[in-house]
Amino acid sequence: QFHKVTRLKKRPDLLISLLFSRLQKRLADSLDVRPGQEMIQAIASAESCGAAVIFADRSAQITFRRIWKKLTWMEKIKLIAQLLFGLIRGVKISESEIEELKSQDTLASLLSKFGRKFPQLKKTLIDERDQYLAAKIMEAPGGKVIAVVGAAHVPGIAEQIHSKKDTR
């Protein structure tokens, strides 16, 4: 962790990355889940049916750099404060809340609120990555593709893929 902190002066986007990863770890710990478990399962499932595994997401480092560049100073302060508050307060979410988040209506509502509170962050973290992931999925070799993505990306990726198919 220390080497990351010493580089913050040169790369302030590392602060957001570090805070996000700590918050993600706390959330995983509270749910007794290992971070990356879904990816391990996806790889095992792909291998069991002979499918190729392609990691299609944009590098987290690039994403966090883009976020940092696009946020105003006020948005940066607000984001850092929110992340620190989440770390200090602790992340507590129940199994029933997780199940509720799987509902497309609940997820759409949360993404809408997130977009209003942090429009530039949503654009970079969700919308741009939806476009990137959709392009990678469409470029994937083979006749059939199984894509494992976060629930927040499903609507945007589906929209991107359908709009690209409609223009062909």
Image (cartoon, helix red, strand yellow):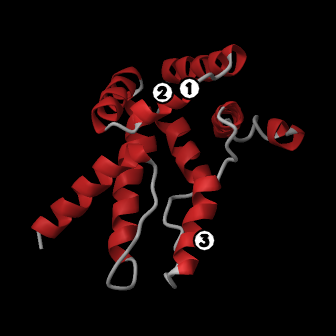
Residue type marked 3: Ala
Query: On residue 97, which mark appears?
Result: 2
Q: Secondary structure at mark 2?
A: helix
| Disc 1/disc 2 C-alpha distance (Å) | 5 Å
Query: On residue 94, which mark appears?
Result: 1
Residue density around tag 3, few if under 14, some if 14–19, many if 20 or more, within 10 Å = some
Residue density around tag 2, few if under 14, some if 14–19, many if 20 or more, within 10 Å = few
Q: Secondary structure at mark 3?
A: helix
Return the disc, 1 or 3, that comes first in the chain's sequence. 3
For the residues bearing labels 1 and 2, Cβ distance under 8 angstroms:
yes
Write down the residue under mark 3: 44
Q: Residue at x 35, y 34 (%)?
A: 107
Height in image: 70 above or below 110? Answer: below
Residue 27's x, y, as percent?
Answer: 64, 32
Residue 83's x, y, as percent?
Answer: 62, 23
Residue type marked 1: Ser
Height in image: 93 above or below 153? Answer: above
Q: Nearer the viewer, residue 135 or 49?
A: 49
Residue 137, picture quadrant: bottom left
| Disc 1/disc 3 C-alpha distance (Å) | 27 Å
